[in-house]
Image (cartoon, rainbow, N blue to C red):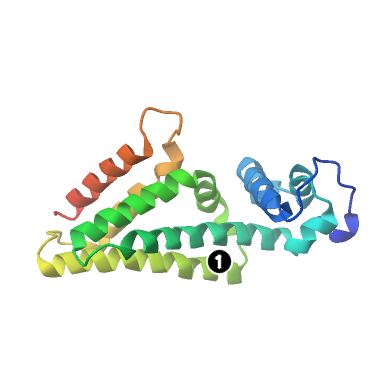
Amino acid sequence: MTTASESSSHTGPAIPRGQGGDALSVAAREIFAERGYHGASIRDIAKRAGLSFSALYYWHSSKQELFAGLLEDSVLDYVRTCDAALHDCGDDPGERLCSLVRATVDYRVRRRVESTIAAREARNLDPAHAQRLAELRESATRLFQDIIDDGVRRGQFRCEHPAEARRAIQAACNAIPQWYDPEGDVEPAELADRYVAIALRVVGA
């Protein structure tokens, strides 16, 4: 890994004051998606962001910290998206499941690149970072499972294996970044409608 001592001059376009961190995040996302964790270098990320090494290290102490921060920001965005979707729902399990599925589809479409990076490269996280991300993801998993379990208790969902139903729904949603084309003929809202219908069938609503 390149160190801060290997600094080079800023040769890219000028970064507006206060926006260097945003430029760095965009560059890191692109480079990690193109080359993977091991193929990405701090030098290339800094160059694409239009930053010197000293500026890059102002935000992150290493490539691992930059990578972990990118993934954690993405997962936190998902958790916030889910919380917001459920905030205005009542306690009806069907309504809550539909809202959660729509939020998940929205997130997977909106942050396709980060979702793909996480699926392919998360194994390269150091244990402490991996544990932190696992805990965040588990909070989202509990949202799905609690809703499905509640629906089964109330007799609204008729599925013999709630845990497997939850896995099937999440797996279907999580696979969206692998194939979804924003230039294709399926709009995000229609895609969400389709996945809501699939989820309701899976739980026997």
Q: Position of residue 93 (x, y in %)?
A: 20, 63
| Quarter location, residue 7 | bottom right
What kind of element bears circle 1? Answer: helix
Left-right relation of 174 to 30: left
Q: Position of residue 129 (x, y in %)?
A: 59, 68
- For label 1, count other residues whose C-alpha is less than 10 Å away and answer few (under 14), some (14-19) or many (20+): some
In this rendering, the count of numbered labels is 1
| Quarter location, residue 145 | bottom left
Q: Is residue 34 above or below residue 98?
A: above
Question: What residue sits 84% from the left and 58% below the top?
Answer: 54
Q: Which residue is mark 1?
A: 130
Q: Position of residue 76 (x, y in %)?
A: 50, 62
Q: Amino acid at mark 1?
A: Ala
| Quarter location, residue 181 | top left
Quadrant showing the N terminus: bottom right
Q: Is residue 156 above or below residue 183?
A: below
Q: Is residue 134 above or below residue 30?
A: below
Res 165 visible: no
Relative to the observer, which residue lies in front, 153 or 73?
Answer: 73
